[in-house]
Image (cartoon, grey):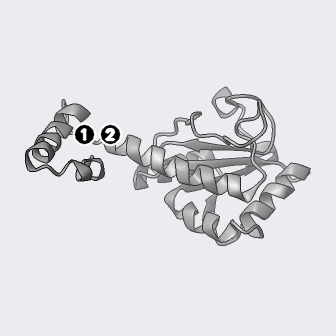
């Protein structure tokens, strides 16, 4: 856990994380930090002692949690979408694609993947779980079937029976 909450199930390599993510069809949270970094220490407290730590721990089960520190930082530019600063926290789909649209929307300008507050970590974990589970369900369409083709019978049924208020729930 390297100080980032012993109750969270962490792995310490991207390769291992990707293997588990593909097997379990789970998105990944990649944490990159350094032991000599003051902001990284703040981020540790977000995971361990903040008012959000318990909920972060619970939400972690929706992800394969990858924890890299110091020299383990990957050199591949895909893990540096807006720079090589630390700490960085990236969300990836179950195939290992970095999801740049999921970032710290309340964070510092120019450092979209920089986190140090528990509320920011939890908010983006929730958003990533929503966004990435939606993408997984779209990828699991029947071969050759589009979203609109699958939705058409639901829409027609709702219009026929006057139950359009339930339409959003079914889609």
Determine which quarter of the picture holds residue 81: top right
Residue 149 x/y as whole percent: 17, 33
SS for callout 1: loop
Disc 1: which residue:
141
Q: Quadrant of the N terminus?
A: bottom right
Residue 4 in sight = yes
Q: Please give the name of the residue rendered at 80% of the width and 63% of the height, measured from the top-left corner.
A: 45
Using residue 94 as the reference point, say whether residue 101 is left or right of it. right
Does the rendering let one see residue 146? no
| 81 relative to 84 in the view: left or right | left
Q: Nearer the viewer, residue 81 or 21?
A: 81
Q: Which residue in the structure is indicated by mark 2?
A: 138
How would you rate the neighbour count of disc 2 (Cα within 10 Å): few for under 14, some for 14-19, many for 20 or more?
Answer: few
Q: Is residue 167 above or below residue 146?
A: below
Q: Quadrant of residue 87?
A: top right
- Name, please, the residue furthest toward the left: 160
Q: Which mark is residue 109?
A: none
- Residue at 71% of width from left, 36% of height from top? 112
Residue 94: x %, y % from top left: 46, 45
Q: CA distance from mark 1 to mark 2?
A: 6 Å
Which element type, helix, strand or loop, lies under badge 2? helix
Name the one closer to the observer, 9 or 91: 91
- Identified at 21% across, 47% down, the residue is 164
Given residues 101 and 84, the one toward you in this image is 101
Image x and y of residue 101, in percent: 57, 34
Estimate the x, y position of residue 96 in percent, counting from the top left: 52, 39
Residue 25 vertical position relative to residue 155 in the rendered view, above or below: below
Look at the numbered discs 1 and 2 and tell me whether their residues touch, using CB distance below 8 Å: yes
Q: In the depicted view, which residue is nearer to us: 119 or 33? A: 119
């Amino acid at each position: 856990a390297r100080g980032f909450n012993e109750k969270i199930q962490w792995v310490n390599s991207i390769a291992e994380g990707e293997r588990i993510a593909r097997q379990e069809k789970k998105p990944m949270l990649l944490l990159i930090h350094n032991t000599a970094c003051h902001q990284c220490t703040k981020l540790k407290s977000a995971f361990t002692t903040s008012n959000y730590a318990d909920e972060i721990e619970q939400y972690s089960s929706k992800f394969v949690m990858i924890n890299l520190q110091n020299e383990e930082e990957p050199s591949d530019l895909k893990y540096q979408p807006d720079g090589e600063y630390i700490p960085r926290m990236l969300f990836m789909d179950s195939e290992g694609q970095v999801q740049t649209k999921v970032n710290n929307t309340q964070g510092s300008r120019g450092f979209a993947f920089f986190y140090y507050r528990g509320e920011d970590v939890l908010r983006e974990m929730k958003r990533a779980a929503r966004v990435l589970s939606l993408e997984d369900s779209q990828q699991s369409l029947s071969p050759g079937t589009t979203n609109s083709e699958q939705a058409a019978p639901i829409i027609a049924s709702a219009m026929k029976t006057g139950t359009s208020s339930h339409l959003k729930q079914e889609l």
